[in-house]
Image (tube, rainbow, N blue to C red):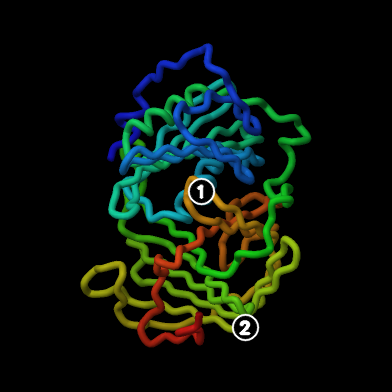
Amino acid sequence: MKIFITMLAMTACLNSMAQKETFDIVSYIPPTGWTPQTGTGYMAYSKVNDSQWGQLAIYKSTASKGDIESDSQHEWQALVLALRAIENDEKTAPRELNGWTVVSRSGTWKYNGADVATILTTFSDGKTCVSLLCNATTELYLKEFLQLIESIELIRPLKSEASLPAAANTAATHTTGIVGLWGTYNTETSGFMNGTPMTTGGYFRKEYLFYGDGTYLYRAKDWSAFVKDIRFVYETGKYELKDNQLTLIPAKGKGEWWSKAASGRTSEWGSRIKTFTPLLEKITYAFEVRYLSGMERPYLYLRHGKPTARDGSQSNQENVLHEFSYGKRNQSEEALIDTPPGTKTGMEGKK
């Protein structure tokens, strides 16, 4: 579905006399006939017509990571890729709008057998970042999202507000609901053609499985078209919750390099080549569990002042807060990381 080729060239005709509403720094004309829902950190709208449905969300602004490319990548990762296995990725070139730089990204995914299109539009002025999201099964609802985008005016926050770090708002932090499987899934690309990412079939996946008895299993799998072998890592240990802090205390871990399957399938394993011991870090994160209605699932945000061996890095700059996001898998959804044959984590069969 070439969303941006057909959609972004359109010009929506808006009624300049329509009454605007304001959420956070976004002033906008609400979509007609959509059901509003106010949540913690977002304003959402939904619409259902027989088998067709759409979801729109305006997210609360956060501190910018410095430029539109960094902000767009972070928002795309946090709000989309960590929850969905996205295909047909597209990205627009940055454009200037009233002192803000705008980038839109899109892709498709499956829900109950139906094709769903996702569009994420991010605005950044280098100090503040804000994003709007659309999930829809029909082009008609995508057009209404485009109308919403064209209606907005952004209110620049006061300096004191713009300088707040992304983790400053902890009022909405929950200390329950962490039990379960949480994952982040990135698709490998080899560059862009006409603004569209070219996927290789490779991927980079990470999952946390938190058990009710205070133990956890972490797994990571990298299958890259540019690397000869497959990298797999697991870690087990205990976790502790206190207020808005989550501490992971590793007990053991193991890393393995595997050859790729002769079939070339990315879901299969070849032979174990060698093992290694990963860095086991006891880390205390500031954490938040937030339900994103636009994505229909809770989201786990882990924040730390430095990069971590498990989660990686969100910035090369010093003194920057690193935020890692993981979408919760439903009970009907299986893990997207499989343990290699013959490898035992010690958590087999545990519920």
- How far is disc 1 from disc 2 in space, using C-alphas? 31 Å
Q: Nearer the viewer, residue 249 or 52?
A: 52
| Residue 100 versus residue 351 in the image, above or below | above
Q: Position of residue 332 (x, y in %)?
A: 40, 66
Task: Please state which amino acid type lies under the numbered disc 2.
Answer: Ala
Question: Residue 251: which numbered mark, if any?
Answer: 2
Above or below for 123 versus 189: above
User: For the point 70% across and 30% down, which residue is it?
Assistant: 157
User: Is 267 positioned to the left or the right of 168 in the image?
Assistant: left
Q: Position of residue 221 (x, y in %)?
A: 43, 69
What residue is drawn where x is 34% and y is 29%?
A: 7
* 37 displayed left or right of 272: right
Height in image: 28 above or below 200? above
Total numbered badges shown on the rendered structure: 2
Which residue reaches farthest front?
Answer: 50
Q: Which residue is mark 1?
A: 79
Q: Nearer the viewer, mark 1 or mark 2?
A: 1
* Mark 1 nearby-residue class (10 Å; few <14, some 14–19, many ≥20): many
Q: Residue at x 41, y 54 (%)?
A: 84
- Secondary element at tag 1: helix
Q: Which residue sits furthest right? A: 160
Relative side of 243 to 323, left or right: right
**Circle 2 SS class:** strand
Residue 263 lies, in percent from the top left, at 21, 72
Q: Position of residue 347 (x, y in %)?
A: 50, 84
Which quadrant of the structure image shows residue 1?
top left
Nearer-N-terminus badge (1/2): 1
Tags 1 and 2 touching, CB below 8 Å: no
Name the quadrant containing residue 258.
bottom left
